[in-house]
Image (spheres, grey):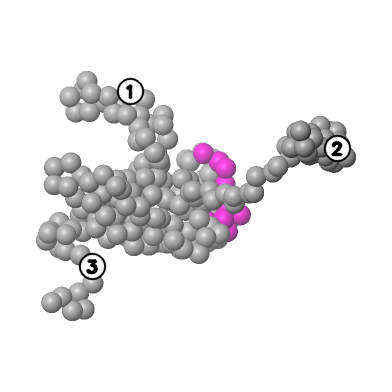
Amino acid sequence: MRHKKKGRRLGRSSSHRKAMLRNLATGLFLTERDESYYDGLTMADGKSVVNPPRFKGRVVTTIQKAKEVKPLVEKCITIAKNSIPHEEAAEEFATDAERNTEAWKQWRESENWKKWVAAMAPAVTARRRVFALLRDKEAVEILFDDVAHRFVDRPGGYTRVMRLAEPRLGDAGTQAILEFVGVHDRVSQVSQKPAFVDEGEDETTAEAEAPAVDEVEAVAEGGEAEATSSEEE
């Protein structure tokens, strides 16, 4: 029995398992690349074209791997989200001058540069922490510049795991989707009772088209009289 043993082994050694989960989390963030990145991109043979992912912010894997990598992804998003206030505070002391220009050099010698460094230090530390987890600079840049800003007002639960009905071809493993919330959310609609009168139809029109009560009663009385006379004959 594996008492007090948190997590799944997934049939791999410790180093192999960490590398696999790291690559899976990195791949999820890299699906958020801009589509222009894939223009003219080919594989190693120079002929096969690399197509962009069909759905951004989504990867398909086994359900066991998806459940294991979910905490890692959400931890990275939380670290990146907590660094946003520090980056916004540092913008007050930043400069728009290009690097190595005279204006930029004057800014480096001013007091604003020291204030910018002090305000930006926690954000730089956060990027280094996430890089230690993912080991991919591009994924870290996408996370801090794009993904983290989506979940500023969300306290947690940035991803979801959805089981797929079709098993994986080959070993019949249970597949699942790991994706960011807020993109492919299902919209629940409240069912309404059917209306007997169309909305575009006037009530007066409906009343005019309906037969009058007196006419219905007269027709009924006439039918009864005919039936009585036929019985007497």
Residue furthest to the top in view is 47
Q: Quadrant of the C terminus?
A: top right
Please check the rendered image and state whether residue 90 is part of the magenta-colored stretch, yes or no: yes
Whichever of labels 1 and 2 marks the residue nearer the N terminus, that label is 1
- The 10 Å Cα crowd at callout 3, few under 14, some 14 to 19, many 20 or more, is few
Write down the region rendered in magenta.
87-98
- The 10 Å Cα crowd at callout 2, few under 14, some 14 to 19, many 20 or more, is few
Give x and y (percent) for residue 212: 85, 37
Dot 2 falls on a residue whose secondary structure is helix
Left/right of residue 14 with respect to residue 124 in the rendered view: left
- Identify the amino acid type marked 3: Gly
Badge nearest the viewer, 1 or 3? 3
189 or 139, which is in the foreground?
189
Q: Quadrant of the N terminus?
A: bottom left
68 or 32, which is in the foreground?
68
Whichever of labels 1 and 3 marks the residue nearer the N terminus, that label is 3
- Identify the amino acid type marked 2: Ala
Give the residue pinned by disc 2: 218
Please check the rendered image and state whether residue 151 is part of the magenta-colored stretch, yes or no: no
Give the residue pinned by disc 3: 7
Whichever of labels 3 and 2 marks the residue nearer the N terminus, that label is 3
- Identify the amino acid type marked 1: Gly
Can I make out residue 221 in this image? Answer: yes
Badge nearest the viewer, 3 or 2? 2
Above or below: residue 43 compared with residue 173: above
